[in-house]
Amino acid sequence: MDTCCIDQTNNVELQESINSMFVWYHHSALTIVYLSDVPPSSESGALAKSVWNTRGWTFQELMASRRILFYQSDWTLYLNDCSPNHKDSDVIIEELADATGIDREALINFHPGTRNVRKTLQWASSRITTRQEDIAYSLFGVFCVSPTVNYGEKKQNAIGRLLETIIARSGDITALDW
């Protein structure tokens, strides 16, 4: 969504969109995930190996969405699972939990905010982003914080500001030990 629907050249729109993305996913009727690197008729385990599981912005997609469907590269449902929500599929949730280290319960019913900061940061820590600051910006909605977006500030500064905001809101200094 961020590359297709957000005007990256408009700083006001970019700031508002980054601060709203978690809410958009959470309130969406359905999140559709296209797994371009998962071939047709893939067996269990292909989703775990997908590049989708490594990208920073997809962390909030996964956590915020209440209803999600995963599609393989030929637009067939992953594992031919025709359930209306892949978060209800034990096989898919188990695969995601094993691949990401995220608790099953959190995958199914994540609550954003500053509870479990350390654990949430650990879950997101292996993700990668194209723009270095996005590793912090992609977590704003997860923690219900909205520091200013400032591309060019470098990854360390963006993460530092994110942690500072989280600690100021929660008082949880374990955020520094993730």
Image (cartoon, rainbow, N blue to C red):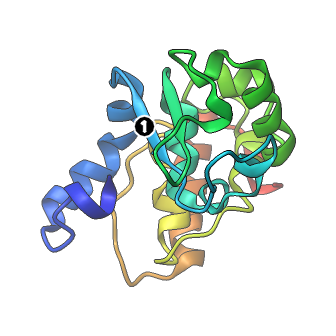
- The residue that appears at 87% across and 40% down in the rendered structure is 98
Assign a secondary structure to mark 1: strand
Front position in the image: 98 or 163? 98
Q: In this image, 87 relative to 146: left or right?
A: right
The residue singled out by tag 1 in the image is 32
Kind of residue at badge 1: Ile
Q: In this image, 173 relative to 143: left or right?
A: right
Front position in the image: 32 or 173? 32
In the displayed structure, would residue 18 be above or below residue 118? below
Q: State which quarter of the image contains the C terminus.
A: bottom right
Query: Toward which corner of the image does residue 21 lie, by quadrant?
Result: top left
In the displayed structure, would residue 47 be above or below residue 10? above
Q: Position of residue 43 (x, y in %)?
A: 78, 43
For label 1, count other residues whose C-alpha is less than 10 Å away and answer few (under 14), some (14-19) or many (20+).
Answer: few
Q: In this image, 144 relative to 59: left or right?
A: left
Q: Position of residue 50 (x, y in %)?
A: 67, 57
Q: Position of residue 88 (x, y in %)?
A: 65, 15
Query: Toward which corner of the image does residue 94 lie, by quadrant?
Result: top right
- The residue that appears at 60% across and 76% down in the rendered structure is 156
